Amino acid sequence: MEEINKFTQREELKTYFETGKYPTQGQFGRFIDNYVHLNEFNFGIEVKPAGEYETKNYHFYVAKDLKNSHRGHINLEDTGNPPQDIDGYTHVLSRGFGYRYLNVKLSGELDIDKHKPKIIIKRYKQKKRLYSGYLKPPGFYKECNEDAITWGRQSEYPVTSTEMKLDINPVNYFRPGADYKEFYPAGTFNRPGSFRYSVHHRKPYSLIQMLLEIEVNGTKFRSNPVTIKILLGRDESDLINYIIN
């Protein structure tokens, strides 16, 4: 059965119009389907902090053996119960955080049913030498969504309307510091040159990028990213906020 909604290779399209050939109706159809109108690429997202905010309490745990643990810390939302014992981890802190939601609006005209848009989140990661010996450069990387969920995050959000309010659980982009009073971006190392505080606010921050992914004729395209600096509040009365570029 012939595949539909797939791009046909350019070289194959050219053969339809060689001297002496008469393109069929189906070949003309494939030629037109491979032409993507510029309006279909006029897409992206606008992101702003919402006026509404949420307050949650969390329990924070640190691995007893950081070097040999595959997971250095655990953040658990407090559901009203005292901190539980977790094998291999020590409970170091419990506190509340207030944070704003994010308003996300699609820019341009986009058919949601046709293009199946998703909001993609990438986290900034420091350079890291992998077990294979490869030195992974610093940059923004999308987490496997299943892995992100285990950390209380999401790397994909299905788009259901042209305007959405997202709860990205920003606390889960941080981990307790060495003295358990400060916080650092999750996944970072304590070493010279590590970023910790915003210049003007002197608050711990974590970097993410948010972008829109759509499908056009079976091929996925991504918009330009929006960079978001998540600023951690100094205390429970200081809301987590965002600087958006």
Image (cartoon, rainbow, N blue to C red):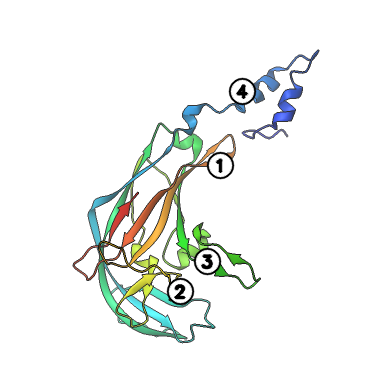
Q: Is residue 59 above or below residue 103?
A: below
Q: Assign a secondary structure to mark 4.
A: helix
Residue identified by numbered label 3: 127
Q: Residue drawn 48% across and 66% down?
A: 126
For this rendering, which residue is in front, 224 or 172?
224
- The mark found on residue 20 in the picture is none
Identify the amino acid type marked 3: Lys
Q: Residue beneath label 4, please?
A: 32
Question: In front here: 119 or 76?
Answer: 119
First of labels 1, 4 by sequence position:
4
Horizontal side of 2 relative to 184 (left or right) equals: right
For disc 3, the neighbor class at 10 Å (few under 14, some 14 to 19, many from 20) is few
Instruction: Give SS at disc 2.
Output: loop
Other residues around mark 4 within 10 Å, as few (<14) / some (14–19) / many (≥20): few
Determine whether label 2 and label 1 are within 8 Å by CB: no
User: What is the CA distance from the residue labelled 4 to the residue labelled 2?
Assistant: 51 Å
* Neighbours of disc 1 within 10 Å: few (<14), some (14-19), many (20+): few
Mark toward the start of the polypeptide (3 vs 1): 3
Residue of label 1: 220
Which sits earlier in the primary sequence, circle 3 or circle 4?
A: 4
Cα separation between marks 2 and 3: 10 Å
Distance (Cα) linking label 1 and label 4: 18 Å
Query: Quadrant location of the N terminus?
Result: top right
> Which amino acid, by three-letter code, is at mark 4?
Ile
> Label 2, label 1: how many angstroms apart (C-alpha)?
34 Å
- From the top left corner, tell me how far across and down residue 21 is, in percent: 79, 15
Whether the residues at callouts 3 and 1 have beta carbons within 8 Å, the answer is: no
